[in-house]
Image (tube, rainbow, N blue to C red):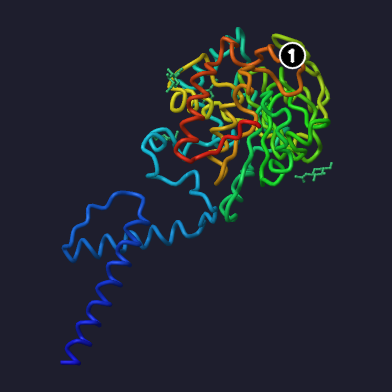
Amino acid sequence: MATIRKRVLKLLTLLVLLIFLTSFFLNFSHTVVTSSWFPKQFVLGFSENLKRFMKYSHRPCTCSRVCVEQRRVSRWFDRRFNQSVQPLLTERNSLLGEDIYRWWLKLQGEKQPTDLNDTIKELFQVVPGNVDPFLEKKAMGCRRCAVVGNSGNLRNSWYGSQIDKHDFVLRMNKAPTIGFEADVGSKTTHHLVYPESFRELRENVSMILVPFKTLDLEWVVSATTGTGTISHTYIPVPAKIKVKPNKILIYHPAFIKYVFDSWLEGHGRYPSTGILSVILSLHICDEVDLYGFGADGKGNWHHYWENNPSAGAFRKTGVHDGDFESNVTSILASIDKIRIFKGR
Ligand SMILES: *[C@@H]1O[C@H](CO)[C@@H](O)[C@H](O)[C@H]1NC(C)=O
Ligand SMILES: *[C@@H]1O[C@H](CO)[C@@H](O)[C@H](O)[C@H]1NC(C)=O
Ligand SMILES: *[C@@H]1O[C@H](CO)[C@@H](O)[C@H](O)[C@H]1NC(C)=O
Ligand SMILES: *[C@@H]1O[C@H](CO)[C@@H](O)[C@H](O)[C@H]1NC(C)=O
């Protein structure tokens, strides 16, 4: 009697273990495995999951929150997020598809663009064209990023020290930190600009140029190599900048179109720097926190460094659909892909 009970116990333990292991690997798999209990298929499925486990365990995300790129958390997200679109322009991926090139050319209606192939070639003689500065993500457990927008809701927020604790701190356009450290922090790792929104950056900050026209790429060359021939686009732009060429990265035009098509579903004429920074961060970070997005507590849209709260700096620009962009970030927050800090 006792031995039979022991045997049953053993069998039960084994069964529980088997169920546990199976559910572990099924849970781990990123696609729905229609569970089939035919031995052969089961073994195949098991080894498939094992392979996947080995592959993904090269870069385990050790965040306490669910990592951004985790599939099957939200279908809305999975339909939009495409990991294989590359955020940065490099020598290797610089050949634009015809449809992308034509779309990009229309953004600012450039009348007589120079040959893009020539321009890019020239560009990569100046800025590094073969680096992927985000690749080391793969070796990191959890890359936490703060994307800091320019909203007046940062005023008196005291977010500064919290922002500075992130691995990456992305800022954009004319955003200053000096004099606003308590609210916006002092650390910057990446700063997104286009020629018309340029500000000088500290030496250790990577500048990410967002090109909206061919002239923007030419400007990088002109402004860093000292020829300084471009001082005016549609408004005056700095003819020379101090940023070192080796700290310059180029946002990929195809990625701009991806943000426009996949995330904004064609709303607005083209994406704002704000939403371009947010979607970029989804691709290069494991955890994303947003600061300084949206209106302030009184519904005003203005920059945190401006004293005129009714300036409405961003909302009604005519080229961006601020409402739709803000819906996208709200949805991202509602499915826990990002967190939004709205000021206090
Ligand atoms: C993702 O992007 C790649 C590269 O641009 C493209 O070839 C592919 O079709 C896209 N996948 C989806 C599901 O849209
Ligand atoms: C760049 O060169 C490729 C072939 O190398 C060509 O197909 C493409 O049309 C060129 N693009 C432009 C903008 O000239
Ligand atoms: C960049 O340099 C400043 C001093 O110029 C320093 O305080 C800061 O810690 C540096 N930031 C990074 C991310 O290395
Ligand atoms: C944003 O979301 C709100 C609430 O869901 C909706 O009423 C509104 O139409 C959306 N705006 C845009 C521009 O899609």
Q: Position of residue 248 (x, y in %)?
A: 71, 34
Query: In the drawing, does residue 133 fall left or right of residue 332?
Result: right
The relative height of residue 117 versus residue 80 in the rendered view (above or below) is: above
Amino acid type, mark 1: Asn
The relative height of residue 252 versus residue 46 in the rendered view (above or below) is: above
Q: Which of 248 and 61 is in front in this view?
A: 61
Please name the residue shown 73% across and 43% down the image: 161
Q: Position of residue 223 (x, y in %)?
A: 78, 23
Quadrant of picture, ligand 1: top left
Query: In the drawing, does residue 37 fall left or right of residue 269?
Result: left
Q: Where is residue 44 in the image (x, y as percent from the top left)?
A: 26, 62
Please name the residue shown 73% across and 30% down the image: 156
Please name the residue shown 59% across and 33% down the image: 89
Would you say the beta carbon of the disc 1 residue lies within 8 angstroms of ligand 4? Answer: no
Q: Which of 220 and 68 is in front in this view?
A: 68
SS for callout 1 = loop
Q: Where is residue 35 in the image (x, y as percent from the top left)?
A: 22, 56
Residue on which the image places disc 1: 308
Q: Nearer the viewer, residue 204 or 123?
A: 204
Please name the residue shown 61% across and 18% down the image: 299
Q: Residues within 10 Å of mark 1 (few under 14, many from 20)?
A: some
The relative height of residue 33 versus residue 304 in the rendered view (above or below) is: below
The relative height of residue 272 versus residue 112 in the rendered view (above or below) is: below
- What is the tally of numbered marks visible in this picture? 1
- Quarter of the view holding residue 206: top right
Quarter containing the N terminus: bottom left
Q: Residue furthest bottom?
A: 2
Quarter containing the C terminus: top right
